[in-house]
Image (tube, rainbow, N blue to C red):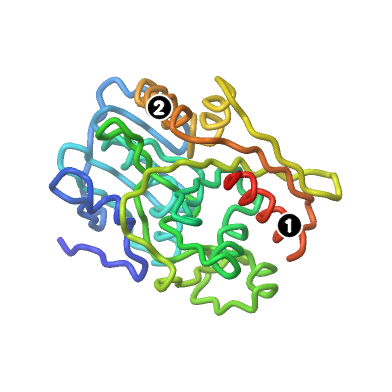
Amino acid sequence: MSEHKFSVFLPNTIGQLRKPNLTIRYLQNETLFFTNPVLKKKNLVLSTEGFYFTAASLNFLYNHEAKTLFFTKTNDETVEAYILGPVIALIGAFQGFVPLHAAGVKVNNLSWLIVGRSGTGKSTLLYELMRNYSATFFSDDLVFTVFRKSRVQAMPSFPFIKLWEDAVLRFKASKQKAVHHKINKYYLEQSTCFVSDIQQPSVILVLQTSTQSTTSYEEIKGTKKFLYLQQNVYRKPWIEALFKENVFFTLTALSKQCRMFVVRRPLLTNAKIWSEMIQKLINELNS
């Protein structure tokens, strides 16, 4: 049975999990009987033994004991889009990680997590920080967190970020390939700005959009920090169905470890607004 090789490598996180590393193979005649599944949906069956996930005429079968992911052979681009999102998030959760819908960036030697729903501008803010504030990054869109050595650590992924076409045009960036043929979103290789070290986050930005014409932000304290983090667990209903205790433990520790700011930006945000918002935050963190 031949193993599959991707043009975009799987996150370094998988390489840092307990051995053996993840094996990825074409799905042929493999079957896996799930005893007492904890979650059964139209496109997902989740059990302590692994999961079966279907999307866009694709089938993914993960055997946790064998640390092997099987999938139906099809267009590589489509497979990558799902593996580097919901599939890898579930596999990481099986390995003890809590996946956050976030970008990870280093600014002035501080590790930030930029969390937020799709479309709030996480990757755009990340790219703005890299271009104009000498920032580096360690992950885009999905960050794995884990409690180790009395601290919550954030894992590096791979040296690509994903930007919508309007952001690519505004930055005059060079796009490498489409994330998916049905959407105007592209991978941009950023190897020179990528750091592969495990990080200890100290700042969390919760990015939101607003109907206001100006940017506002507020620092969040107390138990609200946990609630904001919980809202931004990647595929939250799936992850909490089987790993709720680990989510609670990890996010509680992370909320105590980091300062948190909710940043509300206008729906239409130009370069000037991004710059003013970033400078305010940096000044606040340095005060």
Looking at this view, is 139 or 150 the one in front?
150
The residue at the point 32 percent across, 59 percent down is 196
Say which residue label 2 marks: 253
Instruction: Using the image, determine if residue 227 lies above or below residue 196.
Output: above
Looking at this view, is 13 or 148 the one in front?
148
- How far across and how far down the image is residue 208, in percent? 69, 43
Of helix, strand and loop, which one carries label 1?
Answer: helix
Please indicate, yes or no, whether residue 75 appears anywhere in the rendered image: no
- How far across and how far down the image is residue 198, in percent? 31, 50
User: How many marks can you see?
Assistant: 2
The amino acid at mark 2 is Ala
Quarter occupied by the C terminus: top right
Q: Residues within 10 Å of mark 1 (few under 14, many from 20)?
A: few
Instruction: Using the image, determine if residue 11 lies above or below residue 207.
Output: below
The amino acid at mark 1 is Glu
Of callouts 1 and 2, the N-terminal one: 2
Of helix, strand and loop, which one carries label 2?
Answer: helix
Q: Which mark is residue 223?
A: none
- How far across and how far down the image is residue 119, in percent? 65, 51
Say which quarter of the image contains residue 1. Answer: bottom left
Instruction: Using the image, determine if residue 103 lies above or below residue 7.
Output: above
Say which residue label 1 marks: 276
The residue at the point 13 percent across, 46 percent down is 19
